[in-house]
Image (cartoon, grey):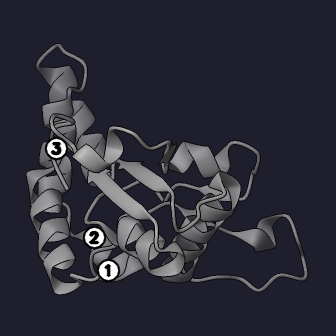
Amino acid sequence: FSRLPMGISDRLAHAPIVLLIAAFAAADDSTCHDPPPHSADAASASAAAAKGRALTGDDTAEYYNTASHYDILWGKDNIHIGYYPHLSNRNAIVLSFPQAAQMMTRRAIELGDVRHDSVVLDLGCGKGIGCREVAQLTGATCVGLDLSTENIQRANAMAKEHPLL
């Protein structure tokens, strides 16, 4: 896991890469949704506007470095949009935020045709939950990039906790 896309890995040099990003799985599906807006999002935008500028990558990194509400909504370490099949299929069960986040990863795996020999680049990987699930479910290699140093530190710690992935 890295904050910058420099020197990602020799493994990526000669392999096709599947991008695992929220928009990828949402491309053909209206059942993928962002979480409810949080006041910190508005506060970051307001602070930037007060300084007469647009939001920057540093503003976004600061937001994610200090945000703690995701652990409450989605469960520890999960910063993910969700996939909610019940929005298009009345027979589908209503999923909780953590379940919808896991379903989102599974949907991206399906749409990306991720297999054991795939290399996945997770842009905006957060704390690495998506990469861990991709590796666990498919055996694929997954590399994560994120703006937040706090997220990358947690993702690297999680990767050490699961050395076989």
Between 125 and 48, which is closer to the camera in this rendering?
Answer: 125
> Element type at marker 3?
helix
Residue on which the image places disc 2: 69
- Residue 30 location (% of width, % of height): 75, 51
Q: Nearer the viewer, mark 3 or mark 2?
A: 3
- Residue 125 location (% of width, % of height): 33, 55
Q: Nearer the viewer, mark 3 or mark 1?
A: 3
Label 1 with label 2: CB-CB less than 8 Å: yes
Between 11 and 165, which is closer to the camera in this rendering?
Answer: 11
User: Badge 1 local density, few (<14 within 10 Å), some, or many (20+)?
Assistant: few
Residue 61, numbered label: 3
> Which residue lies at the image location 59% right of the left edge and 60% below the top edge?
114
Q: Amino acid at mark 2?
A: His
Can the viewer see residue 85? yes
- Residue 58 location (% of width, % of height): 13, 34
Can the viewer see residue 66? no
Residue at the limit of the structure toward the front, as seen here: 14
Residue on which the image places disc 1: 72
Q: Amino acid at mark 1?
A: Ile
> Element type at marker 2?
helix
Q: Quote the CA–CA distance across marks 3 and 1.
A: 20 Å
The answer to whether residue 12 is above or below residue 33 is: above
State left or right for residue 78 relative to residue 151: right
Between 16 and 72, which is closer to the camera in this rendering?
Answer: 16
> Which residue lies at the image location 19% right of the left edge and 15% below the top edge?
53
Q: Amino acid at mark 3?
A: Ala
- Residue 22 location (% of width, % of height): 52, 50
The answer to whether residue 96 is above or below residue 155 is: below
Q: Earlier in the sequence, mark 3 or mark 2?
A: 3
Q: Quote the CA–CA distance across marks 3 and 2.
A: 15 Å
User: Badge 3 local density, few (<14 within 10 Å), some, or many (20+)?
Assistant: some
Q: Earlier in the sequence, mark 3 or mark 1?
A: 3
